[in-house]
Amino acid sequence: MLDINTYNDLIKFSDGFLLDLGDIFNYYQEIKESSYIISIIYSLNLSIETISFFLRKNPKEIETQINQTKIILKKFKLTYDIEKDKITLLSLRNTKLEK
């Protein structure tokens, strides 16, 4: 599990292998999308009040962002647990990561 308060928090895999989020982004080599994911990770920490405020201001934009977030999290095999405020790596067991 990853505490999303800071970018450099580590993800610990079940086999004990540690990676920081930047290594995952570098592996996929999608700089533009990686930057977007970083902003998503920070934005997921928004309070319900903040989200409600934005929904009132521009509901269509928020809906688009939520949909894009779901797609990107799915692509990177991440899930967001809103109750625990955590991002969880589902599986990278079949993926080789090279530096």
Image (spheres, grey):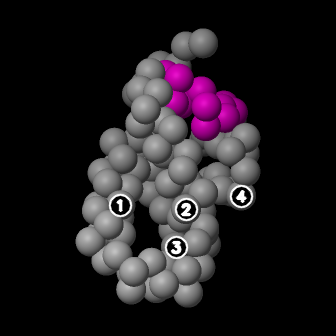
Q: Tag 4's secondary structure?
A: loop
Label 3 with label 4: CB-CB less than 8 Å: no
Asked if the residue under mark 2 is in contact with the one under mark 3, i.e. CB atoms within 8 Å, the reply is no
The residues colored magenta run: 17-27
Residue position marked by numbered label 3 in the rendering: 82
Query: For the point 60% across and 67% down, which residue is it?
Result: 45
The kind of residue tagged 2 is Ser
Crowding at label 3, few (<14), some or many (≥20) Cα neighbours within 10 Å? few
Is 56 included in the stretch rendered in magenta?
A: no
Return the disc, 2 or 4, that comes first in the chain's sequence. 4
Q: Is residue 30 rendered to the left or right of residue 18?
A: left
Residues at discs 2 and 1 in contact (Cβ within 8 Å)? yes
Q: Which residue is mark 1?
A: 65
Q: Are marks 2 and 4 in contact (CB under 8 Å)?
A: no
What label sits on residue 43 in the rendered view?
Answer: 2
Give the main secondary structure of the magenta stretch. Answer: helix
Q: Is residue 52 above or below residue 43?
A: below
Q: CA distance from mark 3 to mark 2?
A: 12 Å
Q: Secondary structure at mark 3?
A: loop
* Residue neighbourhood size for the residue with mark 4, other residues' Cα within 10 Å, grouped as few (<14), some (14–19), many (≥20): few
User: Please, what is the three-letter code of the amino acid marked with disc 1?
Assistant: Gln
Q: Residue furthest top?
A: 99
